[in-house]
Image: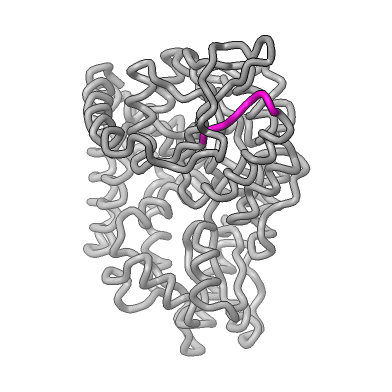
Amino acid sequence: MKKGFLKSGLAALISLAMLTAAGCSGGGSKSATDNAPNSSDANSGGAPVKIEYFQMKPEAVNVVNELITKFEQANPGITVEQNNVPNPENVWTMRVSTNDAPAVFTHYPHNSIFQKMAKEGRVIDLTNDPLMANVQPAIADLSKIDGKNYMVPIGVATLGMYYNKDIFESQNLQIPTTYSELMETAKKLQDAGITPFYFHDKDFNGIRQEVVYKMGQTIPDVESFLDDVMNGKAHITDNPAFKPFAEKLLALREYGQKDNMGTGYDDALRDFANGKTAMWFTGIWAIKEIKESSPDLKFAMFPLPTENAADLKTQVSVDTAIGIPADGKNKEEAKKFIEFMSSKENVETYLSIAGYPSGIKDVQTGLPEISTLTQLISDGKVYPTIERLWPPGMNAEVGKATQEMFLTKDIDQYLKTLDTIFFNKSNQ
């Protein structure tokens, strides 16, 4: 990718972030002891040290405050200020770019702007640091940027097929383990007058998630191939795996609800919770809302099946990872805080808010509804989200192009559109 492309995108982000930061100064959630004075890099002579923990998940504020209190009790010379603001990724970019980086922060290793900043040396390389010792090897590998680890991954997210247990039991259905079994299950449900799948195809973002998941799972060496396309060395239409990939996307829609193009995410979640469909594909983040919407619903998830059961794996993205800026203050105390936050006991506490699988070894977490997915992750049968290597905005273009294909049913045109989106983009 040419430097001008990233620089212009980064400049726009910084401008937006400066406005956001101005509106959020003094905001966020802080430790009860946040009035402690700042200090220099060392906690020498018992002088109190204050570090800022800039974390990006608003739903985690309360549990993080609990953990901060526990940390401060065990480390009386260090106080921690939690900071959670709107548009955190943009604010983080602005602060790091203007040498105002927080001492400790969360981010996403797959984020293109974070990757750029890491490659520029703005984030500490933790590859051989003891902080990485307890990270699951497969999760450490998919978190790498040019072969290096810049963050300690705590929790991970994945996607899968939600299914209604009562409907499956009433129809004597087993969880499908191959693509053909999935289609056979869908046909049996449709023949019984039950809607097999719900799709929220009104939202191109949801479509994009499905496309990225299935590309990474089913197209061999897709990252390498798309890199060639983005460098002008190949075309999408050169790869024979893309047409059957698109055909299967359309084939699933034959077993969906009639108004899939008019159904948004919230609509699909509500209707799945109300038992109007047997299956729904999305991420594990929907579990909490489903339970809130329908507390008595019996449901679980299974990984989207592949042609051969032996090839089964699931996409994983790091949901929470902690790092240190290269020019940050109080690095020793910052590392001590990361060591605390990545310990087995504290990771279990942190992940209990949503039941996400852990990036740390031997942590007992993950809700029973996702036990099959959690086992795949523990076994290392994972792959990273392939869009982490795409320029900003490309994933939205892919989602919109696929949405158009669902309307026109024109697969050949879809592949041409994908080629237009990807071809030679790294040289523009």
* Quadrant for the C terminus in the image: top left
In percent of width and height, residue 211 lies at 40, 51
Q: Is residue 346 magenta?
A: no
In percent of width and height, residue 103 lies at 51, 23
Q: Is residue 18 left or right of residue 105?
A: left
Q: In this view of the protein, can residue 411 be seen by the observer?
A: yes
Most foreground residue, 426 or 282: 282
Q: Is residue 422 left or right of residue 350?
A: left
* Quadrant for the N terminus in the image: top left
Most foreground residue, 131 or 179: 131
Most foreground residue, 215 or 168: 168
Q: Which residues are magenta?
A: 76-81
Residue 137: image quadrant is top right
In percent of width and height, residue 313 lies at 61, 48
User: Residue pushed farthest right?
Assistant: 362
Q: Residue at x 32, y 29 (%)?
A: 230
Q: Residue at x 46, y 34 (%)?
A: 110
Q: In this view of the protein, can residue 428 be seen by the observer?
A: no
Q: Is residue 113 above or below residue 285?
A: above
Residue 409: image quadrant is bottom left
Most foreground residue, 287 or 381: 287
In percent of width and height, residue 115 lies at 43, 25
* Magenta stretch, main secondary structure class: strand
Q: Is residue 202 above or below residue 244?
A: below
Q: Residue at x 64, y 40 (%)?
A: 69
Task: Please tell me how many numbered marks the rendered image carries.
Answer: 0
